[in-house]
Image: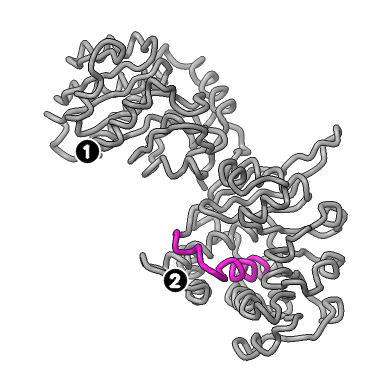
Amino acid sequence: MRTAYRVETVRAAEAALKARLPEGALMQRAAAGLAAACCSLLGKGRVYGARVALLVGSGDNGGDALYAGARLARRGAGVTAVLLGDRAHEGGLAALRAAGGRVVDSAHDDPFEPLAAADLVLDGITGIGGQGGLRPDAVPVARAARGSDAVLVAVDLPSGVDADTGEVAGEALRADVTVTFGTYKPGLLVDPARSYTGALRLVDIGLGGELPGVADLEALQHQDVARLLPVPGAESDKYRRGVLGVVAGSARYPGAAVLAVEGALRGGAGAVRYVGPAADAVIAAHPETLVHPGPPDRAGRVQAWVVGPGLGDEPGVAEVLASDVPVLVDADGLRGLDPSLVRARSAPTVLTPHAGEAAALLGATRAEVEAGRLAAVRELAARFGATVLLKGSTTLVCGAGTEAASGAAVAGGAVRVNPTGTGWLATAGSGDVLSGLAGSLLAAGLRPVDAASCAAYLHGLAARRASAGGPVTAGDVAGALGGAWRDVTAGL
């Protein structure tokens, strides 16, 4: 599992480690890892004679870049540091000069000449404490670096992005590769900042023992998902594997019901009970489905419900929320959803909005949600006391919130960010498949946060398999779920 920590936590861990190390040792570890990454990017035998430009701000990131540049210069690279701050790390500057590097002060010299000739540019303008985008005087240089033919490597994180939130409040430098130190930072894994990081590399500087056990952000990997997925035993039957109820579809949107049911069936549900007006379409596509005219509380025993996909103005949301089993609410079920109705439930609830639906629930704009995805998912989880899966370019899952003694709402636990998926997944009906898949995992007994995050992971992986770089339909994604599941569990 990848874990990420907020700046405050990282700085406390660095301070604890520095107290036990010689002066400057931690920066030297970071610089050594950064220089090694640069060597691999330049290619075997290409460091000698390579032209490297360093964009150096006044913080420790600038020092990391200078010390890494000194290491590259000692290996025969031609290294030029472009100073962009009002000061630079003195030890790093001395090391670079001693190794034969050149220094250009952007306030008095031409900063663009070294960039035009560079094979590789190190972005050390701002560090993890930077906020609000690049300073105006750094913007022309950053644009020149991005417009050059050089490989652009960000030191710890791209300058101009927010390390804690992933927000990009102004101009930021878009990297080809980001080399980060000690641990991942949340902003590196969450859009919009994630799209600025390029390929992501982690350098171990010995910080692990100083970090707390509970991270701020988690990203599941294959082995994590494999351990969570249900596996039927010899004594399993369709009821023990989990029965999912689905309230979805309408005369206008019968396909939503079909896709939600298919997601559930391919997600391992032992049986699916469908309630709604699209029964004929559901049975035609999936004759194994158990259908009932409703209401939901008369359809038979289920271990979880999914309600909302393509529901339109059909009834069912209030009836399902009145049940004593886990409920997943999606799409039309989210319209006008009352937080008090959700918070009053005795069983868990999962909400799966996209950015537009999240904005409506929060009384915000879609742009505000997309710019601050972490804040939005935490606020929704806290406000509704529910697990929230916020769909989008980076899908986020936040556990159910609680209410503090002060009465303020507090989101629960680490946020999980989904690392799988493809841009082709933005297609009609894909969310209906995801709802059915997540619902089937709820019915199988997974915790809500595990059901939501495993579903997002498998859904994104299936989309990659089905797409292979080209367009897909929601049906294609559903059809690839079995292969994605087998890929994940192959190592068990």
**Residue beneath disc 2:** 472
- At horizontal 74% and vertical 86% (from top left) the residue drawn is 291
**At which x and y percent is residue 171?**
44, 32
Q: Is residue 411 left or right of residue 130?
A: right
**At which x and y percent is residue 336?**
78, 58
Residue 356 visible to the viewer: yes
Looking at the rendered structure, which numbered label has been put on residue 169?
none
The answer to if 135 sits in the magenta stretch is: no
**Residue beneath disc 1:** 149
- At horizontal 53% and vertical 64% (from top left) the residue drawn is 458
Q: Is residue 133 left or right of residue 367?
A: left
- At horizontal 48% and vertical 67% (from top left) the residue drawn is 462
Residue type, label 1: Asp
**At which x and y percent is residue 65?**
33, 23
Q: What secondary structure is the stretch in magenta mostly built from? A: helix
| Magenta stretch bounds | 422-439
Q: Where 256 falls versus 197 (above or below)?
A: below
Task: Work out whether mark 1 precedes mark 2 in sequence or the reverse, and give the earlier one.
Answer: 1
User: Label 1 neighbourhood size at 10 Å, few (<14), some (14-19), many (20+)?
Assistant: some
User: Label 2 neighbourhood size at 10 Å, few (<14), some (14-19), many (20+)?
Assistant: many
- At horizontal 58% and vertical 42% (from top left) the residue drawn is 217
Residue 158 placement: quadrant: top left
